Amino acid sequence: MRFVFYTHSLVSDWNHGNAHFLRGVMRDLVARGHDALALEPEDGWSRANLVRDQGEAALARFAETFPELRSAEYGPDFDHEAALSQTDVVVVHEWTEPALVGRIGRARRDGGRFTLLFHDTHHRAVSEHDAIAALPLEDYDAVLAFGEALRQRYVAAGWGRDVHTWHEAADIRLFKPAPDVRKEADLVWIGNWGDGERTAEIAEYLVEPVRDLDLSATVHGVRYPDAALETLAAAGISFRGWTPNAEVPGCFAAHRVTVHIPRRPYVESLPGIPTIRMFEALACGIPLVSAPWDDAEGLFRPGTDFVFARGGEAMRDTLEALLNDLDLRRSLAANGLETIRARHTCAHRVDELLDILSRCGTAAVVSELAQKEAAQ
């Protein structure tokens, strides 16, 4: 089958976490013999910032790291209808320009043979309700929402004809333990400052425990204002800036523990949705302590796969206990890895996607499933 994914960017993961998941999904589709192409705007914000921050070499590095992945840019004169004419499945991310969301929908309505899906991996359904409500989704076959709470928002609002929960996951071809890497420091956090959505949480669950315990710690991320950098430096935290997502497994491997700090809109309004970093960290076999969030869908086994810290003092005490107990660290790491491999890989999500497509009546998927059943 031929898949086309409209994304903000495949090439750049600069402050763009959806690229992590999409790369893993596309890699798995290609490994199964499908054709997968990403289409991204030529003036995409993430890509532009990556080049400004790291130079053109960062784009070349993507091609070297993921040789099986294909991405093409589109501009104002791009012929989307022609590009989709021989496609089986089109997946449009919610950060796509509304006019283009509508144009692709009309192409589907006006005789397009492809199954058309809308993919939402953000909190704008809550924080920017009117913007999502205005999107023309009536010609889309289904919506993929990256959490049950978000799916319910779509259903309640009447957005989309058929809405499915489709969580993010880890690409375990890339995210896996590296036990031979030498430990360089106690703790690492990989996360962007963002738009003030977790400023207080970063202080409570990262900066203050590291300072109080006098830990060696590293932070990777972007969009940190000068005041934030000064705060990290005062706590003795080494700030390393942006790192390519493909190098994150090595960052995890070089540290003893990591923390998970979700953004406030998810904690308050969309329970059950962790950041993708949690899937990736557990896939790498690093012990993880998380700030509070509601695992409403039972994605993990709290206390077994990772540890919740209900407040800054609890975070400090838990980190101290972990760093002084090698057996506990090994147990958490093994359990978290077990859950990822059993339930939360990109291969699992591709299986789910194909099941959703079969329920949508996608001809190529139905035929493929029928052939497999006949062979059995």
Image (tube, rainbow, N blue to C red):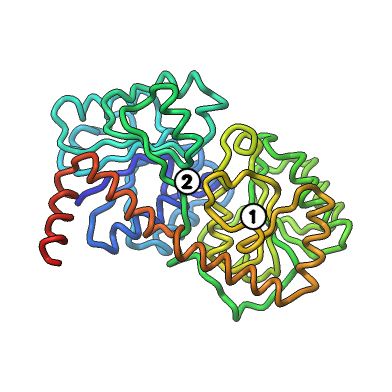
| Residue at mark 2 to residue at mark 1: CA–CA distance | 15 Å
Q: Is residue 224 left or right of residue 300?
A: right
Q: Residue at x 37, y 54 (%)?
A: 25
Mark 2 residue crowding within 10 angstroms, few (<14) / some (14–19) / many (20+): many
Q: Quadrant of the C terminus?
A: bottom left
Circle on res. 140: none
153, 97: nearer the viewer: 153
Earlier in the chain: of badge 2 and badge 1, it is 2
Q: Residue at x 33, y 46 (%)?
A: 38
Q: Is residue 172 left or right of residue 229?
A: left
- Residue 34: image location, x then y, percent: 23, 56
Secondary element under disc 1, as helix, strand or loop, is strand
Mark 1 residue crowding within 10 angstroms, few (<14) / some (14–19) / many (20+): many
- Residue 328: image location, x then y, percent: 71, 72
- Residue 271: image location, x then y, percent: 58, 39
- Is residue 44 visible to us here? yes
Q: How many marks?
A: 2
Q: Is residue 49 left or right of residue 205?
A: left
Q: Residue at x 50, y 62 (%)?
A: 340
Q: What's the residue type where badge 2 is placed?
A: Asn
Q: Residue at x 73, y 63 (%)?
A: 187
Which residue is under mark 2?
A: 18
- Residue 224: image location, x then y, percent: 70, 43
Secondary element under disc 2, as helix, strand or loop, is helix
Q: Is residue 215 left or right of residue 147?
A: right
96, 113: nearer the viewer: 113
Circle on res. 190: 1
Examine the rendered structure and indicate whether residue 170 appears above or below residue 9. Answer: below
Q: What's the residue type where badge 1 is placed?
A: Ile
